[in-house]
């Protein structure tokens, strides 16, 4: 057994069933090992940002890591933006990054890079394997890091001679990933705050937004009248019928300050104190009031479900049904608007759909109109590096077992990773992509106002995508995905309904 075979079999033994790959010469023995090992599904991405984004989306739905296969430092660099997003979403990923043979590195060949330094920028755990005998052990350690309850990005750098040398061994670790226990004193402190005076917000993130956590949160809220809200930076939210009608902390700094100004106490459940995405002239970086006190119930590496259950029990909060969100909305008609599109998606989406949301500025008001939709999971751009909507949708579909994925996708950021469509076609994945086509970087036009800059003709031309216009129907068809254009919400609804009947990807170019 060579080193590459020992890594593949160690990962497979540890429950990794999917390898997302864009390999090169240094990874050829790993590719051969994949071919020789039963049970590992291999999916090709045409760019590393697609590969890493797919791994993020896969984890968010599967709840367990996939591995990526990337080519040397530059290949890792190509995938770093979506590894940044995955790290913010707390997604577990095992990156296998090929590298120069150990004896070849001193010659400074063209692809030689400081791969470890690159990896540390977007990884919780990094190691370079130095010999075939230890490669399996290193893979087991990477998997243990990635598979922690709140996932981590683990990067194993695998020099090519470590892959091809004999002496590899499969390592099976019975040791469970470490999850810090919940501090009972933190639970007691949160209970004291909730029993006392003052206005209290419970801010939820991580698995504090799962179905079970929401049920505990509602017990607590109805007993104490605390307000519940989701953090803005979240990877996955359980939504729809039978789930809480939660709103997120607003993106806009002024709106966030207004939403949080009255709270005397904020209890953090896998969340951090809210801060602005960016600094703006004459505005604070923090979004909460100066008198607000923070109390940590659970950190982002702890089990929020357990913490919320303990807090509900500490308060003696009885089980109580989550309120009905009301009747499912009807599909809207006419010119596409944010509210109308949200209503239409809520009206038509199948049960247990998955929403991959990179709608950016167009989608800020989607939540209120989708509370009464069927049960679904909503996946957000957690790290702010645009270009994750399509890859996350693709990875979610790979994990979803046939669940319909709806990708609400801004047109500008879609160009960062449109190669995802090719993988969707190749794997025949049930993804409906709705391109929100306003032919401009609209979010940056809003940011101009936010920072107080005054754009002129040159600046505005840099935010314009209409010269030449992007033909999304042709782009999709060129990737093997059926596509059509819609000018009205009626046309969009008809195309959505049609796409939901076929086990294949479909793209709707919605002119907004």
Image (cartoon, rainbow, N blue to C red):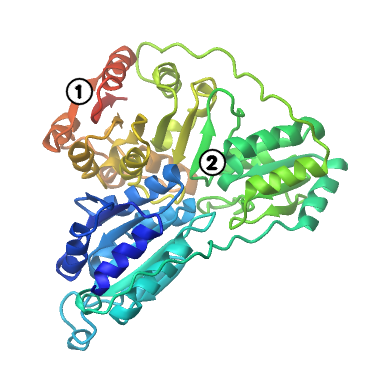
Q: Is residue 242 above or below residue 465?
A: above
- The crowding category of the residue bearing disc 2, from other C-alpha atoms within 10 Å (few below 14, some 14 to 19, many at least 20), is some
Task: Name the residue beneath numbered marker 1.
Answer: 484
Res 288 seen here? no
Q: CA distance from mark 1 to mark 2?
A: 33 Å
Task: Name the residue beneath numbered marker 2.
Answer: 252
Q: Position of residue 135 (x, y in %)?
A: 33, 74
| Quadrant of image for the C terminus | top left
Helix, strand or loop for disc 2: loop
Q: Position of residue 167 (x, y in %)?
A: 27, 79
- The crowding category of the residue bearing disc 1, from other C-alpha atoms within 10 Å (few below 14, some 14 to 19, many at least 20), is some
Q: Is residue 274 left or right of residue 290?
A: left
The residue depicted at 62 percent of the width and 56 percent of the height is 302
The mark closer to the camera, 1 or 2, is: 1
Q: Are marks 1 and 2 in contact (CB under 8 Å)?
A: no
Q: Is residue 32 above or below residue 415?
A: below
Q: Nearer the viewer, residue 107 or 183?
A: 183
**N-term mark: 1 or 2:** 2
Res 57 seen here? yes
Q: Is residue 299 left or right of residue 78?
A: right
Helix, strand or loop for disc 1: strand
Q: Quadrant of residue 82?
A: bottom left
Q: Quadrant of residue 263?
A: top right
């Amino acid at each position: 057994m060579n080193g590459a075979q020992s890594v593949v079999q160690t990962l497979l033994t540890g429950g990794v069933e999917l390898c997302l790959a864009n390999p090169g010469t240094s990874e050829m023995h790993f590719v051969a090992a994949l071919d020789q090992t039963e049970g590992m599904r291999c999916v090709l991405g045409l760019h590393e940002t697609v590969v890493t984004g797919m791994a993020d989306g896969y984890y968010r739905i599967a709840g367990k890591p996939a591995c990526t296969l990337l080519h040397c430092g530059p290949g890792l660099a190509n995938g770093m933006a979506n590894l940044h997003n995955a790290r913010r979403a707390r997604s577990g990923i095992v990156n296998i990054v090929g590298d120069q043979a150990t004896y070849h590195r001193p010659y400074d060949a063209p692809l030689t890079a400081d791969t470890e330094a690159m990896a540390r920028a977007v990884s919780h755990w990094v190691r370079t394997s130095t010999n075939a005998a230890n490669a399996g052990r290193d893979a087991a350690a990477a998997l243990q890091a990635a598979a922690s309850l709140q996932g981590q990005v683990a990067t194993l750098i695998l020099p090519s001679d470590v892959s091809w040398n004999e002496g590899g061994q499969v390592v099976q670790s019975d040791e469970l990933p470490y999850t810090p226990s919940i501090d009972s004193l933190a639970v007691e402190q949160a209970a004291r705050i909730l029993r006392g005076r003052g206005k209290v917000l419970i801010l939820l993130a991580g698995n504090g937004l799962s179905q079970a956590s929401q049920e505990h949160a509602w017990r607590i809220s109805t007993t104490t009248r605390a307000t519940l809200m989701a953090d803005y930076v979240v990877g996955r939210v359980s939504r729809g019928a039978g789930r809480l009608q939660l709103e997120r902390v607003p993106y806009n700094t002024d709106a966030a300050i207004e939403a949080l100004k009255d709270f005397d106490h904020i209890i953090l459940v896998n969340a951090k104190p809210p801060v602005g995405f960016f600094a703006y002239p004459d505005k604070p970086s923090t979004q909460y009031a100066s008198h607000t006190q923070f109390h940590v119930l659970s950190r982002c590496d702890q089990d929020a479900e357990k913490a919320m259950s303990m807090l509900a029990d500490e308060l003696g909060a009885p089980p109580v049904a989550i309120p009905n969100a009301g009747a499912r909305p009807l599909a809207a008609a006419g010119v596409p608007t944010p509210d109308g599109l949200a209503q239409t998606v809520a009206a038509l989406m199948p049960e247990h759909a998955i929403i991959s949301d990179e709608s950016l500025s167009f989608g800020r008001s989607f939540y209120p109109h989708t509370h009464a939709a069927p049960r679904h999971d909503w996946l957000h751009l957690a790290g702010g590096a645009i270009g994750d909507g399509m890859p996350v949708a693709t990875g979610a579909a790979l994990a979803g077992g046939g669940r319909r994925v709806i990708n609400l996708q801004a047109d500008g950021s879609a160009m960062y990773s449109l190669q995802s469509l090719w993988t969707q076609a190749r794997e025949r994945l049930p993804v409906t992509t709705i391109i929100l086509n306003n032919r401009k970087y609209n979010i940056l036009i809003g940011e101009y106002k936010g920072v107080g800059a005054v754009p002129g003709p040159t600046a505005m031309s840099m935010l314009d995508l209409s010269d030449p216009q992007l033909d999304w129907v042709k782009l999709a068809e060129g990737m093997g995905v059926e596509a059509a254009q819609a000018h009205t919400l009626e046309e969009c609804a008809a195309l959505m309904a049609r796409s939901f009947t076929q086990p294949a990807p479909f793209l709707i170019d919605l002119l907004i």
